[in-house]
């Protein structure tokens, strides 16, 4: 699962900004092409973490979906405060105090590691008075390796069950409801040898109300300390009970078994899950890595029957209890807590909440056989993926990354650095020039306590896959070249690479920022476990183990593992088939096809021939084009801060503040040069003329020597036709491919660039250490111009460039086709956007542009050419009617920012004879259509005939009483058996709703999510994925959406259950007291007011606001309202809530107060409740005449017959042609922003 999908409050601000910008960008029903899975939260202040890319990847670790169950708990809540005073708690031992910790230069947090006196539980405490989010995490050193053989998946299932009630808090949804009321969430994952639980709260200083409520419920409870927020104390008290007295109720076991089974079914068609389990299934069966870690209903019940499972559940509970008793004790747990309180107060809170965790249980770890023995290595395996993919992965068995020599010298760092290098002369560059390669990466890909896998992964073109013998030969030649250098005792090159890596690691650590508190807390608990296990000093937790001086012996030892007899080579190729008879020396065609037991991956394998092994071990020759890279010349050295320049008071005012900008007769005055900067100060507009607006802000808050330069070029040409936007995307790929080797050294030293195409134009962003930004900008921008010129000259003059264009075309076609194989829920979301958004190109439109690609007669089919691509892009980015927006933020003054803009103008526009500023009438504009009400739908859809007393009557009808329009489709993947629906309930548009309506809808969405999850997912077990969220579509139309994906329930039944839940949710709203409404509102406000944790977050926030104005014309609409979020928060403030008198989180010291973050709306909580009910009844209630609802259904293949039965029925749209006709009946929502309202 994608964890970000289940963080409503944490993503609340992003959604609000996205309602301005994101929906007006590439999300316009243009499928976002999926990227590879990314690691979950391993940065955020932890500089040197495990390099194991499997352990924290959502696709590999078994994640518990966030359960925002919401509402009031079924039992009364216990006190948030201690029952005993801190003085009576057994004294804890301080293992490492703050003064001992090695910290980044910018880190203002305080740290302490303690061992609890009652049970020796090791805890990391982090005090951060400036944090708006407080968090806790427990890392358990027990994962699915500990599953008993008769219960595959027990550790994962046990993780689910801990959230289902404890003896002290016996309501199944108590923890999640408490977190929801306090602006928080929770999650967990089960890994091979570990399980991690974490939560977050975002208190809005609602101490008084919360404390009184808790004390009234149990007056024997006492407060731990005034400085520990009640939100965090209450969460920790509930969280701690997971590890003290879980209930494991049998009725909950039954329901959660179905949830795990649904989770398993959701992953059956995902290539990452299939590949990972295949690796496990083919390892040594006597090693725990061989186990099926996810589990399903069958494995967890020993073949039990879902329809008659009472005995299976009864038999399972004792195993759950035993697993908890064996592994959940203080010796196996590590706790991390981050809060605003002092370390002493946090320590007192933890001592109270976790005092009753059982002391360590002494157990002996069983000895293990090798995970991969000789019979599992020296293997070449071919796999047929679900999606169109061509990759080769070489996995070499190595010792664990916790091995003493590896931890001490980090030999894999140098080796991985060289193997994955992309400069001229590298393996990457050579394969890329040959047209074989799309991408190459290297490093430790999987790790356990007794082994690791070091991998080289190559994403190949069709041509590269055809030449895979040559590709593998070159890989082992490259390894041999590195080995030769490692064995050269007279060369110091590897030592210098080692020093470079150490230098950049130190720079990165020195200027690392705190980042997200929750991800940090989860990662820190994990890291603390590793540090304790290997005997390192906990004070090194933030930095991690630091490599000592270069050790040639260590590098030579590690290189010894990179041999074919120690490798598993996996070829994933969608071109393989059951009839393929490839006779290459690296083909497994002589072997029979097999099917992996759990996920059904189709594969075959052979032992690598001895002569091939010999050739790879001792290459007869090394390609002369391969050479080791030079040392990096782009390592930054200037880390000075512009905000610390000598005597800032003497710096010219226009370097610290905006110049006077003239726009239509108005002027913007300069700000006070001596004013202390903070996050409340928005960027200043310093240029507004000739189609160019420039915004700048010098950072004084985060104080990192980095700068970002964001540019957006708006052009009506880009989205003019499916062909034009496809050509622009091809240019994006060719440019990235071309710049790859040129900028690799700069990218590896902290610089970055990205270029993307959206329906409104081109966007690119440069970032990195400030001293390198001018050179980076000049290089990227100059290459854009010269590349366009070379492409226009044609393939005869530039055959290598033409090869890159062909490769880009094939890759984009592959990615577009793969979108058809997205999950049913992703497809439902896409289909809904295609129907709702007015001017949108369908996936089929894009595929039509690729007709003939890869065929011999492609030139006869009006295929896209390199020359045509260059002409379209030239008009779209430099030589047409354009509008340019730029934001320069970070460690830079106005003077430097304007110099960067001058470089951009000079290179792109000054020599472009046809460049003209874009007129308001030419500005690209996008709108959403109004879904029909039930009465309107009756007019659109043709009537059906009924015979009554021999008389034929014409009857107007729609599919259901509440959902008049259904867009149905069938999953393209024939192996996909999950069904999905996305219900879209339109509530109006931004300009009609205004601040008031949008803020209240945010509150409704916040309360609806836990209610829907608790009812539809937890209680009814309709599917593993259930979500409810607010969505903005093109032009600012707003809708409340509910998503459900199910392997067991048909879409029409899901719709029925959705309607039943909606009635239940209305009843819940009616029953909520004003006090509860106020708490829920404060949770939403806390999410809105959460401060940026990093400079990049602040830049993204302001850039989103600026981009959000691009679609609109007129001075009133084109100016961003940087206080927009504050105004939305103000709508939800009640005059009888504690937030009324709470100072702003952005206030400075007593002598320098900022303005309040938001102005209270002066409404009571009862008034707010009435507004919620009114909006619900108007837009969401099934009885409302104004209800505008769409259901996007996707049927799995086992339900295809139901789809076919509905074709042609009134209200059903079953093809894109149906959608085209249907949209002609619909009017559009006004396209005007709500911040422009008087």
Image (cartoon, rainbow, N blue to C red):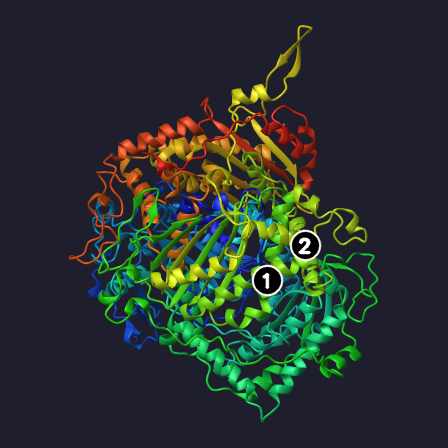
Given residues 923 and 1059, the one toward you in this image is 923
The residue where tag 1 is placed is 786
Residue 176 screen position, x and y as percent? 39, 48
* Residue depicted at 40% across the width and 72% down the height: 509
Circle number at residue 976: none
498 with respect to 118 (left or right): right
665 with respect to 271 (left or right): left
User: Can residue 121 be seen in the rendering of this structure?
Assistant: yes
407 with respect to 1101 (left or right): right
Given residues 615 and 1112, the one toward you in this image is 1112
Residue 581 screen position, x and y as percent? 84, 62
1201 with respect to 30 (left or right): right
The residue where tag 2 is placed is 867
Q: Please tell me which of labels 1 and 2 falls first in the chain.
A: 1
- Residue farthest to the front? 913
Q: Are marks 1 and 2 in contact (CB under 8 Å)?
A: no
User: Can residue 284 be seen in the rendering of this structure?
Assistant: no
Residue 741 screen position, x and y as percent? 59, 70
The local crowd at label 1, few if under 14, some if 14 to 19, many if 20 or more residues have their Cα within 10 Å, is few
Given residues 873 and 985, the one toward you in this image is 873
Q: Secondary structure at mark 2?
A: helix
Q: Quadrant of residue 430?
A: bottom right
Given residues 826 and 928, the one toward you in this image is 928
Q: Secondary structure at mark 1?
A: helix
- Say if 945 sits above or below 226 in the image: above
- Residue farthest to the bottom? 490
The local crowd at label 2, few if under 14, some if 14 to 19, many if 20 or more residues have their Cα within 10 Å, is some
Q: Quadrant of residue 576?
A: bottom right
Q: How many numbered markers are drawn?
A: 2
Quadrant where the C terminus sits is top left
């Amino acid at each position: 699962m994608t964890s970000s999908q289940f963080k409503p409050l944490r993503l609340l601000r992003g959604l609000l900004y996205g309602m301005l910008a994101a929906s007006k960008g590439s999300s316009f029903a243009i499928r976002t092409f999926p990227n590879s899975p990314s690691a979950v939260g391993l940065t955020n202040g932890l500089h040197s973490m495990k390099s194991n890319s499997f352990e924290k990847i959502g696709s590999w670790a078994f994640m518990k979906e966030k359960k925002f169950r919401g509402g009031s708990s079924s039992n009364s809540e216990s006190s948030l405060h201690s029952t005993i005073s801190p003085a009576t708690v057994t004294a804890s031992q301080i293992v490492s105090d703050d003064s001992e910790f090695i910290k980044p230069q910018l880190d203002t947090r305080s740290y302490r590691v303690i061992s609890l006196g009652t049970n020796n539980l090791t805890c990391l405490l982090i005090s951060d008075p400036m944090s708006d989010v407080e968090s806790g995490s427990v890392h358990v050193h027990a994962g699915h390796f500990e599953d008993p053989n008769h219960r595959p998946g027990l550790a994962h299932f046990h993780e689910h069950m801990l959230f289902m009630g404890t003896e002290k808090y016996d309501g199944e949804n108590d923890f999640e409801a408490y977190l929801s009321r306090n602006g928080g969430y929770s999650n967990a994952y089960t890994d091979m040898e570990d399980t991690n639980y974490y939560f977050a709260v975002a208190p809005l200083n609602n101490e008084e109300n919360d404390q009184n409520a808790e004390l009234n419920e149990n007056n024997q409870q006492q407060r731990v300390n005034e400085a520990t927020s009640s939100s965090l104390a209450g969460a920790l008290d509930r969280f701690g009970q997971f590890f003290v007295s879980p209930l494991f109720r049998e009725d909950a076991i039954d329901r959660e078994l179905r949830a795990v089974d649904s989770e398993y079914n959701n992953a059956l068609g995902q290539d990452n899950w299939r590949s990972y389990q295949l690796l496990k299934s083919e390892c040594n069966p006597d090693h725990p890595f061989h186990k099926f870690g996810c589990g399903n209903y069958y494995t967890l019940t020993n073949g039990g029957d879902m329809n008659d499972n009472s005995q299976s559940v009864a038999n399972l509970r004792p195993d759950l209890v035993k697993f908890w008793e064996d592994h959940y004790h203080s010796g196996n747990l590590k706790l991390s807590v981050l809060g605003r309180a002092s370390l002493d107060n946090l320590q007192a809170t933890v001592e109270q909440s976790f005092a009753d965790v059982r002391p360590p249980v002494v157990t002996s770890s069983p000895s293990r056989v090798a995970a991969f023995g000789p019979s599992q290595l020296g293997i070449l395996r071919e796999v047929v993926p679900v999606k169109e993919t061509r990759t080769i992965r070489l996995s070499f068995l190595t010792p664990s990354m916790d091995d003493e020599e590896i931890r001490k010298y980090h030999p894999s760092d140098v080796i991985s650095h060289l193997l994955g290098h992309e400069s001229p002369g590298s393996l990457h560059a050579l394969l890329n020039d040959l047209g074989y390669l799309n991408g190459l990466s290297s490093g430790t890909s999987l790790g356990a306590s007794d082994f690791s896998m070091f991998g080289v992964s190559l994403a190949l073109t069709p041509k590269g896959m055809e030449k895979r013998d040559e590709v593998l030969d070159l890989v082992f030649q490259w390894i041999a070249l590195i080995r030769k250098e490692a064995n050269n005792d007279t060369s110091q090159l590897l030592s210098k690479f080692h020093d470079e890596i150490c230098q950049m690691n130190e720079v990165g650590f020195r200027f690392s920022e705190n980042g997200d508190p929750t991800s940090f807390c989860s990662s820190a608990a994990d890291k603390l476990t590793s540090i304790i296990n290997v005997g390192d000093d906990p004070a090194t937790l933030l930095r991690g183990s630091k490599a000592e001086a270069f050790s040639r012996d260590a590098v030579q030892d590690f290189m010894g593992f990179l041999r074919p007899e120690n490798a598993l080579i996996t070829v994933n190729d969608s071109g393989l088939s059951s009839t393929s008879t490839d006779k290459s020396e690296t083909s497994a065609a002589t072997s029979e096809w097999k099917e992996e037991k759990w996920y059904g991956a189709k594969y075959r394998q052979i032992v690598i021939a001895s002569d091939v092994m010999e050739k790879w071990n001792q290459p007869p020759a090394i390609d002369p084009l391969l050479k080791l890279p030079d040392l990096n010349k782009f390592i930054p050295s200037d880390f000075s801060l512009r905000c610390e320049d000598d005597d800032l008071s003497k710096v010219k005012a226009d370097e610290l503040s905006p110049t006077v900008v003239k726009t239509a007769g108005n002027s913007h005055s300069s700000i006070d040069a001596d004013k202390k900067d903070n996050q409340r100060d928005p960027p200043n507009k310093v240029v507004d003329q000739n189609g160019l607006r420039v915004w700048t802000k010098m950072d004084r808050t985060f104080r990192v020597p980095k700068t970002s330069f964001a540019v957006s070029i708006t052009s009506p040409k880009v989205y003019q036709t499916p062909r034009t936007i496809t050509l622009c995307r091809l240019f994006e790929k060719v440019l990235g491919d071309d710049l790859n080797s040129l900028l690799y050294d700069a990218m590896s030293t902290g610089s970055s660039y990205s270029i993307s195409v959206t329906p409104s134009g081109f966007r690119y962003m440069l970032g990195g250490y400030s001293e390198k930004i001018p050179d980076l900008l000049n290089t990227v921008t100059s290459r854009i111009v010269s590349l366009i010129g070379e492409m226009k000259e044609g393939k005869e003059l530039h055959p290598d460039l033409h090869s890159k264009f062909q490769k880009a075309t094939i890759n984009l076609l592959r990615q577009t086709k793969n979108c058809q194989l997205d999950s049913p829920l992703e497809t439902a979301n896409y289909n809904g956007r295609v129907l709702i958004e007015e001017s949108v190109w369908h996936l089929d439109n894009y595929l039509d542009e690729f007709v003939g690609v890869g065929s011999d007669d492609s030139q006869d089919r009006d295929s896209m050419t390199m020359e045509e691509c260059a002409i379209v892009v030239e008009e779209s980015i430099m030589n047409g009617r354009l509008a340019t927006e730029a934001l320069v933020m970070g460690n830079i003054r106005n003077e430097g920012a304007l110099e960067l803009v001058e470089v951009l103008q000079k290179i792109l526009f000054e020599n472009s004879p046809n460049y003209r500023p874009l007129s308001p009438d030419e500005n690209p504009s996008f709108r959403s259509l109004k879904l029909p009400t039930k009465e309107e739908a009756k007019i659109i859809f043709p009537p059906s005939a009924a015979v009554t007393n021999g008389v034929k009557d014409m009857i107007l009808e729609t599919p259901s009483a509440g959902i008049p329009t259904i867009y149905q489709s069938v999953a393209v993947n024939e192996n996909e058996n999950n069904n999905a629906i996305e219900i879209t309930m339109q509530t109006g548009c931004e300009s009609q709703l205004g601040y008031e309506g949008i803020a209240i809808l945010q509150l409704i969405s916040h309360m609806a999510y836990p209610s829907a999850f608790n009812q539809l997912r937890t209680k009814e077990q309709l599917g593993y994925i259930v979500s409810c969220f607010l969505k903005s579509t093109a032009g600012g139309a707003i809708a409340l959406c509910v998503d459900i994906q199910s392997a067991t329930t048909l879409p029409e039944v899901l719709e029925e259950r959705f309607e039943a839940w909606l009635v239940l949710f209305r009843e819940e709203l009616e029953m909520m007291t004003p006090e509860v409404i106020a708490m829920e509102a404060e949770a939403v406000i806390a999410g809105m007011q959460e401060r940026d944790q990093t400079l990049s977050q602040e830049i993204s926030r302001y850039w989103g606001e600026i981009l959000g104005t691009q679609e609109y014309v007129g001075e009133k609409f084109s100016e961003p309202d940087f206080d927009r979020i504050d105004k939305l928060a103000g709508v939800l403030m009640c005059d009888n809530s504690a937030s009324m008198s709470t100072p702003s989180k952005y206030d400075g010291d007593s002598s320098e107060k900022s303005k309040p973050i938001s102005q209270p709306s002066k409404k009571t909580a009862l008034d707010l409740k009435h507004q919620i009910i009114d909006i619900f009844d108007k837009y969401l209630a099934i009885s409302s005449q104004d209800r505008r609802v769409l259901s996007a259904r996707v049927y799995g293949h086992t339900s295809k017959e139901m789809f076919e039965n509905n074709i042609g029925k009134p209200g059903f749209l079953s093809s894109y042609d149906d959608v085209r006709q249907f949209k002609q009946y619909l009017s559009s929502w006004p396209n005007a922003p709500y911040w422009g309202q008087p």
